[in-house]
């Protein structure tokens, strides 16, 4: 999977050489994010059709986080923002 830009993004986390993050990738890409009160949202897309088919047939996505732990996470397959660009659940 790869990070994907989205209209609601309002900040960017800067990537760099993979060894700086303890991963075996050559580089870790920049990550556009929406930074809200107490949360950060990013958008990801599949690299190729094989990856899409794999998720379709297995129903599984793996999350890899460098380090010994990670904060609570929420993964969604649908829209996180409504058509007005606001997060779902916001008033």
Image: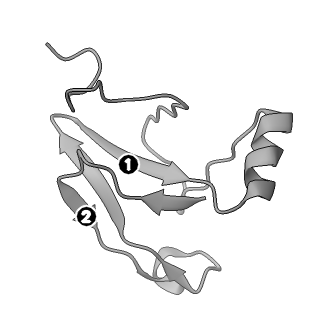
Would residue 24 be found to the left or right of residue 53 on screen?
A: left
Labels 1 and 2 touching (C-beta < 8 A): no
Return the x and y of residue 90 as percentages of the image width and height.
Answer: 19, 17
Which quadrant of the structure image shows residue 59?
Answer: top right
Left or right: 15 as drawn, with respect to 46: left
The answer to which image quadrant residue 55 occupies is top right
Circle 2: is it few (<14), some (14-19), or many (20+) Cα within 10 Å?
some
Q: In percent of the image, x 46 and y 82: which residue is there?
A: 20
Which residue in the protein does label 2 denote? 12
Rendered image quadrant of residue 71: top left
Describe the element under mark 1 as helix, strand or loop: strand
Q: Element at badge 2?
A: strand
Q: Where does residue 17 sit, x and y in percent of width and height?
A: 47, 86
Q: CA distance from mark 1 to mark 2?
A: 10 Å
Figure quadrant of the C terminus: top left
Query: Picture coordinates of residue 42 (x, y %)?
Result: 38, 48
Q: Nearer the viewer, residue 4 or 70?
A: 4
Q: Position of residue 52 (x, y in %)?
A: 73, 48
What mark, if any, has residue 42 been given in the picture? Answer: 1
Residue at 36 percent of width and 63 percent of height: 31
Nearer to us in this view, 41 or 83: 83
> For the residue carrying disc 1, how many other residues have a C-alpha within 10 Å: few (<14), some (14-19), or many (20+)?
some
Color theme of the render? one colour
Between discs 1 and 2, the one toward the N terminus: 2
* Residue 66 image label: none
Q: Residue visible at 38% across and 75% down? A: 15
Residues 18 and 58: in front is 58
């Amino acid at each position: 999977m790869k990070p994907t830009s989205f209209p609601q993004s309002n900040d960017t986390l800067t990537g760099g050489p993979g060894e700086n993050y303890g991963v075996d990738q050559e580089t870790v890409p920049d990550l556009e994010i929406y930074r809200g009160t107490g949360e950060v949202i990013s958008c990801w897309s599949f690299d190729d059709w094989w990856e899409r088919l794999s998720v379709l047939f297995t129903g599984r996505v793996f999350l890899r986080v460098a380090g010994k732990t990670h904060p609570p996470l929420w993964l969604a397959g649908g829209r996180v923002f409504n058509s007005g660009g606001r997060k779902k659940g916001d008033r």
